């Protein structure tokens, strides 16, 4: 669900990534873009085959994730980038997206999907990054060092929230 007005964004097809969210009116840094909404599902019971056509399952906590209603527009349409201009934060069992920097008209809104390191179980891996940024790693998976840093950050964040 978008928390910014329709005047700030538009949904359109991208060349290689399906639908994406693009800036229609400049979005200032630290703006809350929206809340990731949908059905709360148990991760251990989730059928990953549902995500063949896109990566939509959003981590909520160690037990649950959110699967969006794909018939509606929402922040689940924000694509991955190795150099994102938005970020996600879990707060009070809700997931929000916000802008990291000023986003200019025409720019695509992006986040890092923060997939765990590929330990070989993702084979063949379909999580290829197509962001095209100068920092593109070619994958949506984090390195082990990035993953460990992110886990540590999440633990510290829990202490202050």
Image (cartoon, rainbow, N blue to C red):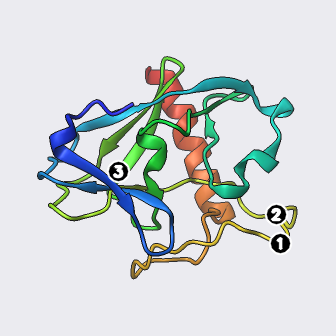
> Which image quadrant for residue 131?
bottom left
Residue at numbered disc 1: 124
- Label 2 environment density (alpha carbons within 10 Å; few <14, some 14–19, many ≥20): few
Residue drawn 65% across the image and 28% down it: 61
In this rendering, the answer to whether 81 lies above or below 1 is below
Real-space CA distance between mark 1 and mark 3, rounded to the nearest whole angstrom: 28 Å
Labels 2 and 3: the sequence-earlier one: 3
Residue 113 in percent (x, y) is at 55, 53
* Mark 1 / mark 3, whichever is N-terminal: 3
Q: Quadrant of residue 101?
A: bottom left
127 left or right of 99 in image? right
**Does 66 sit above or below residue 111?**
above
> On the picture, is 58 further left or further right than 50?
left
Question: What's the mark number on residue 122?
Answer: 2
Q: CA distance from mark 2 to mark 3?
A: 26 Å
Quarter of the picture containing the N terminus is top left
Secondary structure of residue under mark 2: loop
| Residue appearing at x 25%, y 64% in the figure | 107
Question: In this view of the protein, which residue sits in the foreground, 19 or 89?
Answer: 19
Q: Residues within 10 Å of mark 3 (few under 14, many from 20)?
A: many
Name the residue at 20% across, 34% down: 5
Question: Residue at point 56% right, 33% down?
Answer: 69
Residue 157's label in the rendered image is none
Of 6 and 91, the residue lying toward us: 6
Residue 56, x across and y down, in percent:
60, 45
Q: Nearer the viewer, mark 1 or mark 3?
A: 1
- Residue 93, percent across and down? 54, 20
For label 3, the residue is: 86
Q: Is residue 66 above or below residue 17?
A: above
| For residue 114, above or below residue 8 | below
| Left or right of residue 161: residue 5 | left
On the image, the x and y values in percent for residue 41 come to 72, 26
């Amino acid at each position: 669900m978008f928390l910014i007005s329709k005047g700030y964004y538009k949904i359109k097809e991208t060349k290689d990534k399906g639908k994406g969210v693009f800036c229609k009116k400049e979005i200032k840094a630290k703006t809350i873009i929206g809340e990731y909404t949908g059905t709360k599902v148990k991760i251990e019971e989730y059928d990953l085959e549902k995500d063949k056509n896109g990566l939509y399952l959003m981590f909520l906590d160690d037990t649950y994730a959110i699967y969006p209603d794909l018939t509606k527009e929402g922040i689940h349409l924000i694509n991955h980038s190795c150099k994102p201009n938005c970020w996600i934060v879990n707060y009070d069992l809700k997931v929000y997206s916000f802008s990291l920097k000023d986003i200019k008209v025409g720019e695509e809104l992006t986040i890092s999907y923060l997939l765990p390191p590929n330990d070989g179980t993702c084979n063949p891996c379909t999580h290829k990054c197509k962001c095209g940024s100068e920092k593109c790693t070619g994958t949506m998976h984090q390195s082990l060092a990035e993953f460990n840093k992110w886990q540590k950050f999440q633990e510290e964040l829990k202490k202050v929230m």
